[in-house]
Image (cartoon, rainbow, N blue to C red):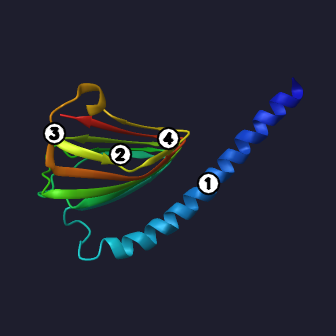
Amino acid sequence: MENRKLFIKNLVIVLVVIGVIGAIGNITEKNKKSETANEGIEEGKNYFEYSYFMSGAKKVLNYNPLKGGDLSCVMGGGEIDLTGSTLDGTATIDVFCLMGGAQFTIPADWTVQNEAVAVMGGIHDENDDKGLETDPNKVLILDGSAVMGGIEIKRR
């Protein structure tokens, strides 16, 4: 019994260390990626970037049209309300959650293309439960990862 507790304790420590190393690698990769992928998109011009470390906030954004965004939550949470925004084609949001969570509230007619990966976490789109009719010309691409955290997409 004592060996089992010691094993579980060491396993949790190893997983947290791996998660932190992955987070550092992901942040540096994201910085390199954003330098090239977001050329021509000025910050504050229909593109958002928020990072939360052991904290959180709720943001209501009204972009016409939304170009994309970047949200990082490490042991914290971010709520992004995009119901006042419009989409013209596609927009990509890059999300990284490490032991934290992200929540997006979007219009009910947007199509969400989930390319994010969850490791000991979860990604939930409310539309999976409701089966709402979505517009194939309004696509929100969700990219990134949730490590021991979660990403939730709500619709209004």
Residue 152, percent across and down? Answer: 36, 38
What is the three-letter code of the residue carrying label 1?
Val
What's the mark number on residue 32? none
Give the residue type that dot 4 points to: Gly
Mark drawn on residue 149? 4
Can you identify the residue that label 1 sits on?
20
Instruction: Write the residue at 35% across / 45% down.
Output: 57
Residue projecting furthest to the front: 136
* Gap between marks 1 and 3 measured at Cα: 37 Å
Kind of residue sitting beneath label 3: Thr
Point out the frontmost of discs 3 and 4.
3
The type of residue carrying mark 2 is Ala
Q: CA distance from mark 3 to mark 4?
A: 27 Å
Residue that appears at 41% across and 45% down: 56
Left or right for 36, reference 54: left
Of marks 1 and 2, the one in the foreground:
1
Q: CA distance from mark 2 to mark 4?
A: 16 Å
Residue located beneath label 3 in the image: 134
Q: Is residue 61 visible?
A: no
Expressed as whole percent of the image width and height from the top left, the position of residue 69 reads: 30, 58
Instruction: First in sequence, mark 3 or 2: give its number.
Output: 2
Give the mark nearest the N terminus, 1 or 2: 1
Q: CA distance from mark 1 to mark 4?
A: 13 Å
Instruction: Say which residue label 2 marks.
Output: 57
Q: Quadrant of residue 102?
A: top left
